[in-house]
Amino acid sequence: MQVTEAILQALQTAWSHKLRSFFTLLGIIVSVAFLVAVVAVIQGMNAYVRERIGGAIVGVNAFQVRRTPIAIGLIDDEDWRAIQRRPIIAPEDVPYVRRALPQARAIALQSGWPTPQADIVWRNKTVGDVFVFGVTAPFQLVQDYQFAAGDPLTDIDVRERRPVVELGYDIADKLFDGNVALAVGQRIRILGQQYLVKGVVAKKGTVLGQSWDGFVMLPLTSFEALYGRRKTTVISVKMSEATLVQPGMQRAEEAMRIAHRLRPGQTNDFTVDTADALVSFWKNLTRILFTVVPAVVAIGIVVGGIVIMNIMLMSVNERTREIGIRKSLGARRRDIRNQFLAESVTLAVLGGVLGLLAGTALAELVNALSPLPARVTAWSVVVALGLGASVGVIFGVYPAVRAARLDPVVALRYE
């Protein structure tokens, strides 16, 4: 019997016993669907963090000089205590970085962590718990901010400590009933102080369901007048090209060591970070899931393989007379073995394909109904189909060998 004929016969058998075939393949379908869906969500999240979150926090083609690293979750208690003893990143450090990086597109200073929250009041309307940032003018270039209305902050606003403010799109939308252009020129109150709205930042969208437009920005000097001098600030540097980021980080590190008067051999008392640090932090977290997924999939695959083996053994018993007839007509052991092995592999691959379709559908459902992104990757498809084929081979060998070893005389007498 040709392999193609064996495959067609296996498909016909599966179709004629649809319910039995479904329960036979259920273990493989569930396992493969789980693998594809979980990998799709994890890979989608990795891409999401890299493309959206990392860029939103640090900026595109940018890096930051910080007192504390972004990947804070990976720091043990002893290292954290050492970080707490570091000196602050202060405005006095900026000239050192600027002299080291004359080719940088923008070098900005922004208020550090923790970011304060306040109620924003306009007339009888209030938006509560809004994040309040203090920035220098180049920060808007680092973050690639566009403006839906009005003008950006300027160096003069920072130097003269002007009482002006930039509103995030969501804040302007709530205060002015959707007419964000109306916000420009109005006076709002923050902690009882009046500020003139100079502009409205264009909508940035949401990340994981969390809006990135619910903030207000003050000139850094006005921010410090309102909240006092923060414990630390963050220096953000934007380069013109991605290839210039790494060399720029090295020069910024050298400049900061000079600014902090560190001797050769002394460890840095600051951190130079990019969005890659955030992406690496996230990938370390998702790696835990990748260690659990194979165990869960393996259990389902083994169960599904055992079921397939039992069904194939039943098929051998049901077709014993057929095997005897084929042997009496000249079929060799190898022919019988290959026939049943092909049927086993076909069933298992069919389960893998159905699991792949189910996993893809589940990933699309997650993508549509939740803020979690999901991306089905090519390697997960290959693994899904490979798992099906390997299960068919591993658990189909014994039934195939048993069928091949049947004595034709005994098989012909079998009722």
Image (spheres, rainbow, N blue to C red):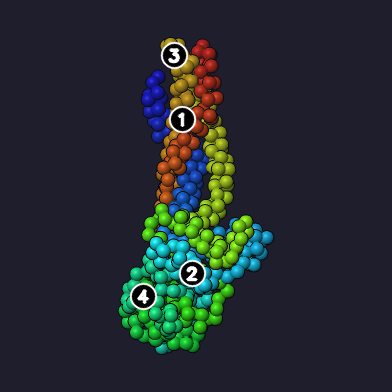
- Compute the Cα span from label 3 to label 1: 21 Å
The crowding category of the residue bearing disc 4, from other C-alpha atoms within 10 Å (few below 14, some 14 to 19, many at least 20), is some
From the viewer's perspective, is the residue at label 4 or at label 1 nearer?
4
What's the residue type where badge 1 is placed?
A: Val
**Pointer 4 or 2: first along the chain:** 2
Q: Give the structural element (helix, strand or loop) at label 3.
A: loop
Numbered mark located on residue 331 in the image:
3
What's the residue type where badge 4 is placed?
A: Pro
Residue nearest the viewer, comparing 265 with 406 = 265
Numbered mark located on residue 94 in the image:
2
Residue 60 in view (yes/no): no
Q: Residue at x 55, y 64 (%)?
A: 258
From the viewer's perspective, is the residue at label 4 or at label 2 nearer?
2
**Pointer 2 or 1: first along the chain:** 2
**Pointer 3 or 2: first along the chain:** 2
Quadrant in the rendering for residue 175: bottom left
Quadrant in the rendering for residue 379: top left
Q: Are marks 4 and 3 in contact (CB under 8 Å)?
A: no
Marker count (numbered): 4
Numbered mark located on residue 152 in the image:
4
Residue nearest the viewer, comparing 64 with 95 = 95
From the viewer's perspective, is the residue at label 3 or at label 2 nearer?
2
Classify the position of the N terminus by image quarter.
Answer: top left
- Compute the Cα span from label 2 to label 1: 66 Å
**Pointer 4 or 3: first along the chain:** 4
Q: Give the structural element (helix, strand or loop) at label 2.
A: helix
The crowding category of the residue bearing disc 2, from other C-alpha atoms within 10 Å (few below 14, some 14 to 19, many at least 20), is many
Is 15 left, or right, of 28 in this rendering?
Answer: left
- Compute the Cα span from label 4 to label 3: 84 Å
- Compute the Cα span from label 4 to label 2: 21 Å
- Badge 1 is on which residue? 345
